[in-house]
């Protein structure tokens, strides 16, 4: 049986100065979130493991996440952070590339003052080429405002796999049909996959219920196909809008009409393939 994998979750020891993106109105996130809190949530949903993703732009955090992962059997892969603006990543990679659970990297592009400009920097282009030669996955974190630039960025860097986080943070008010048109060029790139994560916490129009999110997942499935879509919770950020179970169950409701093999791929098989997680009998 294929492992069931939560393809997107975070750990942190909360310090206000280190997590500036956790602002007013996010009181529930202003505490430590560590493996001992996630493990029972995974167990309750029948999930075998997770992909641990960075939440701070720091090599120190990446080292800390790898240390936590090494002591936490439920963590199957780590997506860390690295400073692409350095161009030559050799010194930074020397600190962490020997860690067996390191599978990829991410930068909080959405938080840059000029996300499009950041992606266009020559140093970033050189660094991405180096990462892809080493077969590290790149988790792409942008909002719907910069999907066109993200598509150009991904098209330039097709030497290895990329994963779009949180469906590209669609504009829910514009509707799923509008988002489907917007995401189509990126989805047309065969090396790019998409995480079904983060929808619960996106700003919703008044009166927008959970069921109103399902068409966005349907659009992602149509655009990327079941072999390039991954289920992820975005825990603990998802707690701003509900409980862990709510995030996972939203995805499970969306994929009920699919075949058993397609459901297995989305619920874990794709994450195992993309992040090179050993697929074992459980």
Image: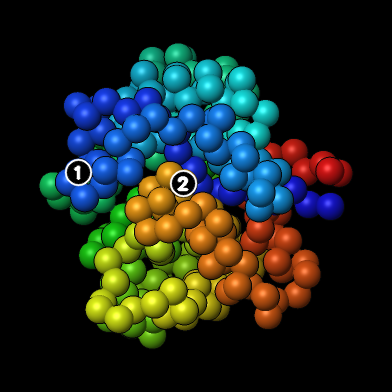
- Mark 1 neighbour density, 10 Å: few (under 14) some (14–19) many (20 or more): few
Whether residues under marks 1 and 2 lie with C-beta atoms below 8 angstroms apart, the answer is no
Q: Which residue is mark 1?
A: 23
The residue under the point 50% across, 47% down is 8
Residue 128 screen position, x and y as percent: 39, 39
Please state if 189 lies on the left or on the right of 29 as rendered. Answer: right
Q: Position of residue 138 (x, y in %)?
A: 45, 44
What residue is at 23 percent from the left and 41 percent from the top?
A: 21
Q: Residue furthest bottom?
A: 177
Label 2 Cα crowd, 10 Å radius (few <14 / some 14-19 / many 20+):
many
Residue at the spot 26% in from the left edge and 43% down from the top edge: 27
The residue lying furthest to the left in this view is 113
When the figure is inspected, residue 107 is found, relative to residue 18, above or below; the finding is: below
Mark carried by residue 128: none
Q: Is residue 137 visible?
A: yes
In the image, 189 versus 225, the foreground residue is: 225
Sequence-wise, the earlier of marks 1 and 2 is 1
- Image position, residue 181 (x, y; %): 37, 80
Q: Locate residue 54: give its quadrant.
A: top left
In this rendering, position of residue 166 left or right of residue 73? left
The residue tagged 2 is: 235
- Gap in Å between the C-alphas at discs 1 and 2? 17 Å
Q: Is residue 93 above or below residue 104?
A: above
Q: Quadrant of the C terminus?
A: top right
Query: Please, what secondary structure does the residue beneath circle 2 have?
Result: loop
- Can residue 118 be seen from the camera position used here? no
């Amino acid at each position: 049986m294929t492992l069931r994998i939560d393809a997107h979750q975070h750990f942190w020891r909360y310090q206000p100065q280190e997590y500036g993106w956790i602002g007013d109105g996010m009181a529930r996130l202003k505490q430590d979130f560590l493996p001992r809190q996630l493990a029972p949530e995974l167990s309750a949903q029948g999930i075998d493991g997770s992909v641990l993703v960075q939440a701070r732009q720091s090599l120190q955090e990446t080292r800390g996440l790898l240390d936590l992962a090494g002591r936490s059997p439920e963590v199957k892969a780590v997506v860390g952070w690295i400073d692409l603006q350095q161009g030559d990543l050799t010194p930074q990679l020397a600190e962490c590339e020997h860690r067996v659970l390191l599978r990829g990297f991410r930068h909080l592009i959405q938080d840059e003052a000029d996300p499009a400009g950041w992606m266009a920097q020559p140093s970033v282009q050189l660094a991405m080429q180096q990462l892809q030669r080493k077969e590290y996955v790149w988790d792409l974190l942008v909002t719907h405002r910069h999907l066109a630039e993200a598509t150009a960025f991904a098209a330039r860097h097709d030497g290895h796999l990329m994963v779009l986080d949180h469906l590209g943070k669609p504009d829910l008010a514009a509707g799923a049909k509008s988002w489907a048109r917007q995401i189509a060029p990126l989805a047309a790139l065969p090396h790019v996959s998409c995480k079904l994560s983060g929808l619960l916490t996106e700003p919703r129009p008044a009166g927008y219920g959970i069921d109103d999110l399902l068409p966005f997942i349907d659009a992602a499935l149509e655009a990327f196909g079941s072999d390039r879509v991954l289920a992820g919770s975005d825990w603990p950020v998802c707690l701003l809008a509900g409980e862990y179970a709510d995030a996972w169950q939203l995805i499970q409701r969306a994929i009920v009409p699919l075949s058993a093999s397609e459901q297995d791929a989305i619920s874990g098989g794709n994450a195992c393939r993309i992040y090179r997680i050993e697929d074992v009998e459980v």
